[in-house]
Amino acid sequence: MKIVRLTTFLDFGGIESRFVNLSHVKDDNNWLFCAINKGGDAERKIRKQNKSVYVFGLPYKIPSLITIWKLYIFFSKEKPDVVHTSGAEANFHGILAAKLAGVQTIVSEEIGIPTQSIVAKTFFNFIYKISDHIVGNSNNVVNYLIKENKVSLKKIAKIYNPIIFPPIDISREMHSKFCIVSVSRLEPVKNIKDVLLVIERLNAEGYNIHYTIVGDGSSKEVLENIVNKNKLDVIFAGYQSNPYPFFMNTDLFILNSLSEGFSNSLIEAMFSGTPSLSTTVGAAEEIIEDGYNGWLVPPQNQEALYIKIKHIMSLSVEERVCVGMKGHETALKYSLEEHINQLMDIYAKD
């Protein structure tokens, strides 16, 4: 079976990490990994797995007739059995092109809960209508698609992201400061700003907190200004292809997103045994049982975040380690093998 996986970029981010993990699959299928616009770190990693990669360098903003046309030509030439697109831009351009090219099985995938205008919602209702299958990576995403985009229950499936777990030592070491880490793009939707403001408040109460932020993005300068103004003990580590060294010997991982589909970094942190705190967005509520294998707070609620972090810091080391170990056990459920099995069930239906 020839399978085209199409997304907007193949540089760094959640979708890109998913594609990199997927490229480790070893089966008899011919996988083609494609980016509408640009490549980068993910592109290089996928090539190392000896998978075919195509970076088209095309306009990605919706709508682009030239992008639809070029993708149509590519699909017509390659004659894939499956075209599976991920993300709004790839869904819009890729699904239309695949339909025009007569691809047998067309799958669109939504990676989060989008903010859509009435016009955009109308367009995507049509995109999902002409798709053979629609995939969401959490209950929240699936429910949104059913309610807002009128997706048929017969077409939709929930498939969690594939995670590859490396061999790591999940034992912890003691240190004097309370160490927090976040791994995410530095964009407003990730709401790192509120984490910094809560840390500033806790420091004023006498707590000794060190915060490492792993990632890059458009909000970096704003966040650096907050750090400098409040003299916070914060390290901006930039984008890192391997986040696991940053999880080791950390007391708490925080995902404070306003919106999320399925967070790879949350699962990776939990796998490392790092006690993890997330907002109740995307799949987090399905993954974490508050106080058992992690902690949950409502999104965009600085006071709730402050109260929860203060509570976590009040726990004994043994109690936090216990929560981290429960998180590790939970993370093991999200394997590449299970993801592939679910994909093949969909691809084989047509």
Image (tube, grey):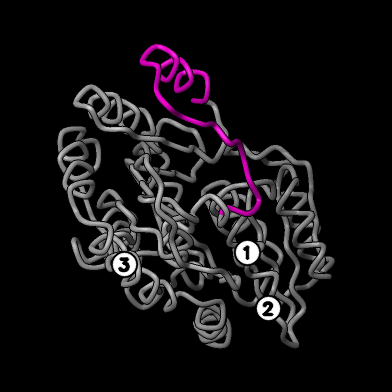
Q: What are the residue bounds of the magenta stretch?
A: 219-243
Instruction: Characterize the local packing of mark 1: few (<14), some (14-19) or many (20 or more) Cα atoms within 10 angstroms.
Output: some
The part of the image, by quadrant, that contains residue 261 is: bottom left
Choose the circle earlier in sequence order: 3 or 2: 2
Give the distance between the C-alpha atoms of the residues marked 3 and 2, in whole angstroms.
24 Å
- Which residue lies at the image location 60% right of the left edge and 70% below the top edge? 166
Which residue corresponds to mark 1?
A: 99
Q: How many labels does the image show?
A: 3
Identify which residue, 121 or 43, lies in the foreground.
Answer: 43
On screen, residue 226 versus residue 54, left or right, reads left
- Which residue lies at the image location 39% right of the left edge and 43% below the top edge? 179
Which residue corresponds to mark 3?
A: 287
Q: Position of residue 17 (x, y in %)?
A: 60, 57
On the rendered image, what quadrant is the N terminus found in?
bottom right
Q: Which amino acid does label 1 sit on?
A: Lys
The correct choice, above or below, for 235 with respect to 250 in the image is above
Q: What element carries label 1?
A: helix
Image disc number at residue 25? 2
On screen, residue 237 versus residue 187, left or right, reads right
